[in-house]
Image: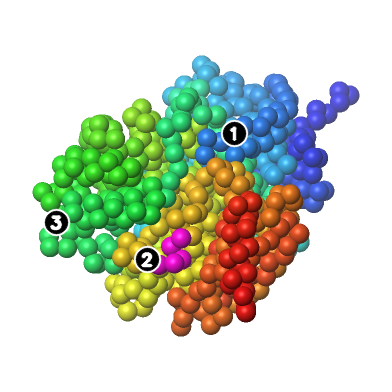
Amino acid sequence: MPAQPDYTLRSPDGHIQVVFSLDGHGSPFYSLEYKNKVILEPSRLGFLLEGDPPLDRGFFVTNLERRTFDETWEQPWGEARYIREHYNEMKLHLQEESILRRELIIVFRLFDDGLGFRYEFPKQPNLTDFRIADEQTSFDFAADHLAWWIPAYQEHRYEYLFQRSPVSSLAKVHTPLTLETADGLYLAIHEANLTDYAAMVLKGAGGSGLECELVPWHSDPEANVVRIRAATPHRTPWRTLQIAERPGDLITSYLILNLNEPNVLGDVSWVRSCKYIGIWWGMHLGIYSWGSGPSHGATTANAKRYIDFAADYGIEGVLVEGWNIGWDEGFLNSKDAFDFTTSYPDFDLEEVARYAKEKGVRLIGHHETGGDVLNYERQMAEAFTLYESLGVDTVKTGYASTLIDGVEWHHGQRMVRHHQEVVELAAQRKIMLDVHEPVKDTGLRRTYPNLMTREGVRGMEWNAWGPDGGNPPEHTTVIPFTRMLCGPLDYTPGLFDLTFQGKNPKNRERTTLAKQLALMVVLYSPLQMAADMPENYRGHPAFQFIVDVPTDWEETLVLNGEIGEYITIVRKDRHSDDWYLGSITDENARILEIELSFLDPAVQYVAEIYADSFDADWENNPHGYEIRQELVDSASTLELVLAPGGGQAIRLRPAIQSWFLQDVGALEASAPGG
Ligand code: NOJ
């Protein structure tokens, strides 16, 4: 008897094992173990096609290729500079036994932090133009794990509070989907390299497993409609399963990036991260309007005021929303209203761009489509060219609507293709992007480094007008472990007036001020917006932290954390020897002990600490904070005392000699009795 072929693949460290198999009908399956524990039972692979027989049975393996890859690559900007890409790969070539003899390739890659697998449809006579009715990939977990989820196909896209419940209770949810197992593992299902396909939604069926559902072309998810239009050769995004023993290790897993293609833009020295402020929060509070009128926010004079503030404090960028015609029509579902090249009469785009340049400030442009994408597509080449001609090198785009052009979901193939077109168009003009109401991030920033950040989260703005009053204190202790796993997020932290007058009396920010500072570190965005208005920042001692905190990192470490409770992240500045720490808690006060062993042992550091005051709490005293300094080194332990809804932000800078004397002098002077 011939030996049974071995379709087993192991991760480089040997801890993860995937086994591919064909059942008695020639249907493909895969299963997965971690440290000899079954994580996935044999789970389905394959496709239902529209107008063609399914591509999920009657297969035999014609060829098996294996390889190992181990290289370290450098991010042009990011949360870590160097990323090791180390995997073992198994590529299975399948062919149907039937008369059609169609071929399908399935590629598995195992890293030490998880699995990626994708399907490839090679060019072949009996599969040319084809349409996918659905993908049958499933994740049949061995137990009913707890999931952190947001619902799919809803009015507000990805902008929901995460809920926690067993997989068996899930209907249709977005990815990344983070799971906690009873025996202390943390798993995340997501996808990587989504370029010409629909996003994957996960569908529960009452058990411990989940199935892939591709977002359909038209807006009825129940209908048996076309989900993918393709022609061979074609390939799917990678389906991913990350595995960690500590929840924080999901955050420092770069598997999603590793499953994307290297940079195709060549020299990207023009791509630069930055902090920015914006004519923005005032609109969300109703102080300014986007449209014309007496409270129009985007006037030439106001833009110059923001630019002056940014220049005074060394904030690199200023966003201006509401400068172009179209807002008066009401932007939700307005048709053909937005004109992306004509400004309101009280806003002189050329003059504002000139002034920003003179002051050394990056003007950040804005394209809000209101979901009227056909209108945008007619104008976008010209609109990007206008910005390019004025030296505006960064654009925030927006797709605020439930459906695109009244028919399509934000996450189907239609919009994936649209975003791909926008990123290429912007890259040709050396323009960087911050995408709001996006398709979820799947790591494309590796290939297109100008695609810097996105929203796709229930961000700060919900505090201004969310009908439920705003984001609860735990929200920002959940999203680092869920939404942030897919990539940078433009949450827009850094609010200083926490008890503002919102749309209704319940609206407010539910954190302390020190937590706002900590969020500048915890929530990673290479374009990081400090949300508040200049009048709330100017002269405020705590604003120094926002001035100092970088947006480009050499290294990121998650020191501790529990999903929905607390998290402490430290990041090393890519352009100095400074480290920055952000620690946040939910509604519970807590004390966290932090060892500073990550610091260079040969160096002493000054810790500039922005902490909750002893009587601070998000509800009754959110503005209570204190700033103090301590000398520390890699043997030190810090005790972080976090108020209810509080946080702590620390800059750790080397106490180099001349500064050191000054630092010690300052410390001695500030010591009790000093
Ligand atoms: C929603 C975006 O998230 C927000 O940042 C923007 O101000 C509005 N749309 C208007 O474009």
Residue 400: in sight, yes or no? no
Tag on residue 292? 3
Tell me how far mark 3 sits from mark 1, CA to CA. 46 Å
Q: Residue at x 72, y 65 (%)?
A: 637
Q: Is residue 488 magenta?
A: no
Which span is picked out in magenta? 539-544
As helix, strand or loop, the secondary structure at mark 2 comes to loop
Residue 486 location (% of width, % of height): 53, 47
Mark 3: which amino acid? Ser
Q: Residue at x 37, y 31 (%)?
A: 430
Tag on residue 539? 2
Q: Is residue 543 magenta?
A: yes
Mark 2: which amino acid? Gly
Position of 219 relative to 564 (above/below): above
Q: Which residue is mark 1?
A: 74
Q: Earlier in the sequence, mark 2 or mark 1?
A: 1
Tell me how far mark 2 sits from mark 1, CA to CA. 38 Å
Residue 380 location (% of width, % of height): 26, 35
Mark 1: which amino acid? Glu
Query: Where, by quadrant of the figure, is residue 582 drawn?
Result: bottom right
Name the foreground residue: 157 vs 56.
157
Q: Residue at x 16, y 45 (%)?
A: 348
Main SS, magenta residues: loop
Name the foreground residue: 285 vs 92.
285
Residue 45 location (% of width, % of height): 62, 39
Residue 154 location (% of width, % of height): 40, 58
Within 8 Å of ligand 1, the CB of disc 1? no
As helix, strand or loop, the secondary structure at mark 1 comes to strand
- Left or right of 302 on screen, residue 631: right
Name the foreground residue: 38 vs 337.
337
Q: Earlier in the sequence, mark 2 or mark 3?
A: 3
